[in-house]
Amino acid sequence: MWTALIGPVARACAAFYPRRRSLLWPLWLVLAVVLAFFALQVWLWLRPRAIPLSSDQIVAARAAAALALDRFERGGGALPATAVVARFSDDPSGGATEALRAEIAGRDRWTLAADSPAKAFLRRIGSSLCDAKTAGELLSPGNHVGIDVIFYGRLVSASTLDGVSRVEFEVSAYDARRGGEVLSGTFAERYPKVSTALGRRTVRQSRRTRIVVFALLVLALPWALRGVVERVRERKSNLASSVLMVGLFACDVLFGSVLFYGVAGRAILAAVGLLVLLVYNLAVCETIARRC
């Protein structure tokens, strides 16, 4: 097969090969462009893709960012302050950088500049020049740009092992008001924070598996307690009915807290899920009571 292909290719090259030396350089130029084009396509195809941080890794990065800002404040960093965050090195997806920006934006007495440090500096330099009223303001616009703190750093690692995500990054802060670095260190956090052997065994299971197990438990629980529901109905006591519903609700909370560490940090999701389960338990108990 290869012989059949090489022959026609060789004849085509011989047919197009110029007989005059003056035409050789255009041929080699075209070949160089074609080879460069194919090399570029191969590089684009083979280059590693930026893998975004998972949702749990983003939470861990946000917690690590909180540690950095807490140290800044404990170390005597002056507040209020306007801050910019330079893109972290070794952070191709920008997840760690955005986590620090989000933590700054969510704190009182901090103001996050929306632009990158360079854009924010140039934009504010331009506005200060336009608003200058004296020769001194024209000659020293950098004193009025309004950027107090510049954060920069490097993403060291982002990993997930046995269901626990860990993010570590180096971050430094330069205070333009003092003219020096006021923060430098390595900060790491895990999510979810699991301290028990049962928790570590649980988070080793995939999230899909835990969701399926949780669904089976909470859906089957009121039906499994059918006899208890019938006895409560026979007693016709509001207190007994309330105790039954509280017990079912407590079991649902226990299942969720064991299978999903850190769910309490997502209050809205947890509240909506528990409300749905409460309505489900009421509906099942009412259905069982009517069939008695």
Image: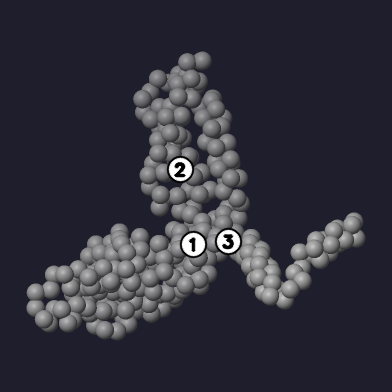
**Residue 140's quadrant in the figure?**
bottom left
Neighbour tally class for label 2: few under 14, some 14-19, many 20 plus, Cα within 10 Å: some
Residue underneath mark 3: 49
Q: Is residue 55 above or below residue 255?
A: below
Residue carrying label 2: 253
Please name the residue shown 76% across and 68% down the image: 17
Q: CA distance from mark 3 to mark 2?
A: 40 Å
Most foreground residue, 68 or 81: 81
**Element type where label 2 sits in the image:** helix
Percent position (x, y) of residue 286?
45, 21
Q: Position of residue 19 (x, y in %)?
A: 77, 71
Tell me which corner region of the image, top left, top right, bottom left or bottom right, holds residue 120.
Answer: bottom left
Give the CA separation, mark 2 to mark 1.
36 Å
Instruction: Compare marks 2 and 1 and give the one earlier in the sequence.
Output: 1
Q: Please state the total of marks drawn on the protein image.
A: 3
Q: Which residue is mark 1?
A: 93
Q: Position of residue 43 (x, y in %)?
A: 63, 65
Decide if residue 18 is on the left or right side of residue 94: right
Look at label 1 and name its amino acid. Ser
Left or right: where does residue 202 sit relative to residue 129? Answer: right
Nearer the camera: disc 2 or disc 1: 1
